[in-house]
Image: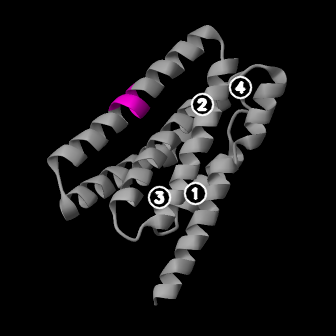
Amino acid sequence: MERLVFLVGVIGNIISLLMFLSPGRTFVRIVKKKSTEEFESFPYICTLLSSSLWTYYGLTKPDSFLVATVNGFGVGVEIIYISLFLIFAPPPTRVKTGIVFGIMNVGFVGAAVGMTYLMLGGEVRIDAIGLMCSALNIIMYASPLSAMKRVVRAKSVEYMPFLLSFFLFLNGGHID
């Protein structure tokens, strides 16, 4: 049974890796054109938030090495994506992205880690972090919908990240 649990975890990690890497073509396009065009940063900010908290959960909960490593990888990849987005975004978008990034990925993550670390211990801490992660996954899985306004307005799916949406869908079905 333990072997099966590990195998399911490895399959989940493969799906998660594909999810983290799926926007790669989008960012190659952004770098080549030196413009974010009409792409949204929100899906990457939300994924970074979720990955950061899942990494903390994986480091806190015993025997959660797979959760910590794959999400730690995701943190690194999402930081690269957001950095590229900030480099190539027009100034108003850069400011908006920076503010949302600061609130969600510095403020919220810092508060969540600080509060759970200082105020809770043992299983209660692990449960609280897991509950936060699960609740925030709803935002992460819905974040590609932020591109829907643009898709509807332009009557084109050009700015809808299909691979990201697809792998978020698959990722939502695996068990951590």
Q: CA distance from mark 4 to mark 1?
A: 24 Å
Mark 2 sits on what residue? 82
Say few, some or many: other residues with alpha carbon within 10 Å of mark 4 (under 14 / 14 to 19 / 20 or more): few
Residue range in magenta is 103-107
Indicate which disc, 2 or 1, sits on the residue closer to the N terminus.
2
Label 3 and label 1: CA atoms lie apart by 21 Å
Amino acid under label 3? Ala
- Does residue 30 sit above or below 56 in this rendering? above
Residue position for label 1: 169
Give the labeled residue for mark 4.
154
Which mark lies nearer to you, 4 or 1?
1
Q: Quadrant of the C terminus?
A: bottom left
Q: Residue at x 62, y 62 (%)?
A: 15
Element type at mark 2: helix
SS for dot 1: helix
Residue drawn 47% across the image and 27% down it: 101
Question: Does the segment drawn in magenta span residue 119?
Answer: no
Mark 2 → mark 1, Cα distance in angstroms = 22 Å
Majority SS type along the magenta span: helix
Looking at the image, is mark 4 or mark 1 earlier in the sequence? 4
Tell me the kind of residue under disc 2: Ile
User: Residue under circle 3?
Assistant: 68
Kind of element beneath mark 4:
helix
Please determine whether, in this image, residue 126 is positioned above or below residue 106: below
